[in-house]
Amino acid sequence: MEPTMISNSNLTNRYLECFPKEQALQKRLLAFLENNKEYKKQIDRKNLQGHVTGSAIIVHRSLTKVLMIEHKAHKKPLPPGGHVEATDKSIFGKCLSGGLGRNRYSKIAVVIDLKLAK
């Protein structure tokens, strides 16, 4: 059985319960998920509607700095991350590997919003 990266149910609905004002902003994402229920379609870089990527927000312990990396193609600073591949088991796993794998810092605490992680 192949993994399901994102569904238009559990996590997405919990997110919108926590942040109801973002419902309008999430219309494109929800439409994408509805039209691309298969894992392979969600991660296909050739999908003209888009594809899933994962990023990690890494904040310095002083809470005054955020790690950003210049994107080679877009030439702008973005949080560390990357394209979700067929070998990734979850979007959260991609966020971790993208965040931890692309920086030289060894002491990083993983913080999860417990309202969303239920």
Image: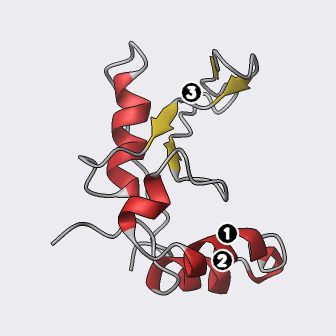
Q: Secondary structure at mark 2?
A: helix
Q: Tell me which corner region of the image, top left, top right, bottom left or bottom right, holds residue 112.
A: bottom left
Disc 3 packing (10 Å; few <14; some 14–19; many ≥20): few
Q: Which mark is residue 79?
A: none
Q: Is residue 110 in view? A: yes
- What residue does disc 3 label? 60
- What residue does disc 1 label? 29
Q: Earlier in the sequence, mark 3 or mark 1?
A: 1
Residue 85 position, x and y percent, is 35, 44
Q: Are marks 1 and 2 in contact (CB under 8 Å)?
A: yes
- What residue does disc 2 label? 30
Residue 98 position, x and y percent, is 41, 33
Q: Secondary structure at mark 3?
A: loop
Q: Tell me which corner region of the image, top left, top right, bottom left or bottom right, holds residue 40.
A: bottom left
- Identify whether 95 is placed above or below 65: below
The residue shown at (45%, 53%) is 43
Disc 1 packing (10 Å; few <14; some 14–19; many ≥20): some
Task: Kindly report which numbered mark, 3 or 1, lies closer to the viewer in this rendering.
Answer: 1
Locate the N terminus and report the quarter of the image it occupies.
Answer: bottom left
Instruction: Give the residue type that dot 1 points to.
Output: Leu
* Spatial separation of the CA atoms under disc 3 and disc 1: 29 Å
Q: Residue furthest left?
A: 1
- Identify whether 102 is placed above or below 117: above
Q: Secondary structure at mark 1?
A: helix
Closest to the observer, 65 or 88: 88
Q: Earlier in the sequence, mark 3 or mark 2?
A: 2
Q: Is residue 108 in view? A: no
Numbered disc total: 3
Instruction: Give the residue type that dot 3 points to.
Output: His
Residue 6 vs residue 59: left or right? left
Locate the C terminus and report the quarter of the image it occupies.
Answer: bottom left
Closest to the observer, 54 or 15: 54
